[in-house]
């Protein structure tokens, strides 16, 4: 059983038998088996978009999890799982909250998919260096270019994590228990709505991977180069600059030794500009976009803690993101702009061939 945010993922090895093997010996193959949560299982159009994107990127030479077909040739299957659910003795949860809870069985439909296993070490598990972040930025630049040529109606959805929908987190900001962080988040949301929202129609759009962070980036353990990316569950059609901002935001959560979060994120920006481009308009809003992703992550994390107040894991993992936002949002804006401009110029002056 593998770690997952809201699905159930399983590693499968040596469990499929080759049809042409007379000895009926198992094939030496590895797979990822995914049971989707109930919400995603209802949106099969989006799951079809994920499958299409992964097949497309695999053909482009990217090391991603490739969907496997079922015996009947489908790209996913559906199963019904039974799980216990707490209800009141009458089954009326709203009117009789004081009544004794009973355990009942609830059946729910879930989509299941099988993927090829992607080899590599998760970037989060190794000591991250500036060169590694630059290489990650280069990889993201190539990935961003490739996704420019992909489209699917399933990616055009309202997604709570999509920055263009940042207004949707407003009702949940109240759940942030740290008053100073709550004020930072509200300030970021306000500035995004004032400075970025009016420009969104002018910004280049495409399908985003939308979660390029150290927990989804795969590293070759010997060369320490980026060799792949996993988890396309946040894929969405939105402004292209958000892909870069998301990656830079998450890099700040664990800054490089003796570096600020801004300087750490600049390493990704430099690498990105070696394989892709960022317009002047996108550069001007990059600071706000980075802060906005941190604000979204902090707010939705606080919402999860509110729903599960005894979950120490959620509380422990919330603090680094809050620290990152406090440090970044209080960093002198002209200095941030100077650091980012230098990273862009350095990256642009040392372009890498992407074909």
Image (cartoon, rainbow, N blue to C red):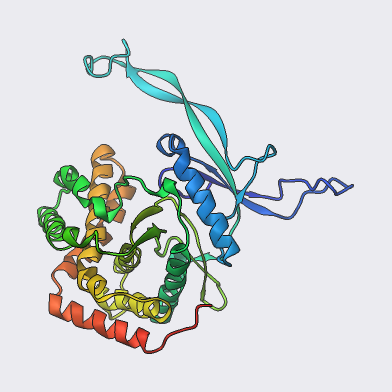
Q: Is residue 181 above or below residue 314?
A: below
Q: Is residue 328 in view?
A: yes
- Residue 157 lies, in percent from the top left, at 35, 45
187 left or right of 36?
left
Say which of 92 and 148 sits in front: 148
255 left or right of 189?
right
Q: Is residue 319 above or below residue 6?
A: below
Q: Is residue 64 in view?
A: no
- Residue 145 lies, in percent from the top left, at 44, 69
240 left or right of 96?
right
166 left or right of 208?
left
Residue located farthest toward the top when viewing the structure as drawn: 90
Say which of 159 and 336 sits in front: 159
Say which of 76 and 5 sits in front: 76
Residue at 76% x, 52% y is 27
- Residue 228 lies, in percent from the top left, at 52, 66
Q: Is residue 282 above or below residue 206?
A: below
Residue at 58% x, 67% y is 61
- Residue 159 lies, in percent from the top left, at 32, 47
Residue located farthest toward the bottom when viewing the structure as drawn: 349
Residue at 36% x, 76% y is 277
Q: Quadrant of residue 175?
A: top left
Residue located farthest toward the right when viewing the structure as drawn: 22
Residue at 47% x, 55% y is 231
């Amino acid at each position: 059983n593998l770690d997952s945010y809201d699905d159930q993922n399983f590693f499968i090895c040596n469990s499929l038998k080759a049809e042409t093997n007379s000895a009926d010996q198992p094939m030496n193959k590895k797979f990822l088996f995914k049971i989707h949560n109930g919400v995603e299982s209802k949106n099969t159009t989006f799951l079809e978009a994920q499958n299409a994107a992964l097949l497309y990127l695999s053909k482009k030479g990217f090391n991603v999890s490739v969907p496997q077909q079922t015996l009947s040739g489908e790209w996913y299957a559906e199963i019904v799982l039974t799980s216990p659910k707490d209800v009141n003795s009458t089954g009326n949860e709203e009117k009789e909250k004081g009544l004794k809870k009973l355990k009942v069985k609830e059946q729910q439909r879930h989509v299941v998919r099988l993927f090829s296993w992607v080899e590599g070490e998760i970037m989060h598990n190794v000591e991250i260096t500036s060169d590694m972040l630059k290489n990650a930025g280069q990889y993201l630049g190539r990935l961003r270019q490739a996704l420019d040529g992909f489209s699917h109606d399933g990616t055009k959805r309202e997604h709570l994590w999509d920055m263009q929908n940042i207004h949707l987190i407003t009702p949940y900001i109240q759940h942030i228990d740290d008053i100073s962080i709550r004020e930072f988040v509200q300030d970021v949301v306000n500035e995004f709505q004032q400075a970025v929202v009016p420009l969104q129609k002018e910004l280049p759009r495409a399908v985003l991977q939308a979660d390029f962070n150290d927990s989804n980036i795969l590293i070759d353990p010997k060369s320490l180069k980026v060799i792949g990316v996993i988890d396309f569950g946040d894929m969405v059609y939105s402004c292209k600059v958000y892909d870069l901002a998301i990656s830079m935001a998450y890099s700040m959560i664990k800054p490089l030794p003796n570096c600020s979060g801004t300087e750490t994120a600049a390493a990704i920006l430099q690498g990105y500009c070696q394989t892709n481009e960022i317009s002047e308009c996108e550069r001007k809003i990059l600071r706000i976009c980075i802060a906005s992703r941190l604000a979204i992550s902090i707010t939705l994390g606080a919402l999860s803690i509110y729903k599960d107040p005894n979950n120490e894991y959620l509380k422990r993992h919330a603090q680094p993101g809050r620290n990152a936002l406090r440090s970044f949002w209080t960093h002198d804006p002209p200095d941030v702009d100077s650091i980012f401009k230098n990273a862009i110029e350095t990256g642009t002056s040392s372009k890498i061939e992407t074909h």
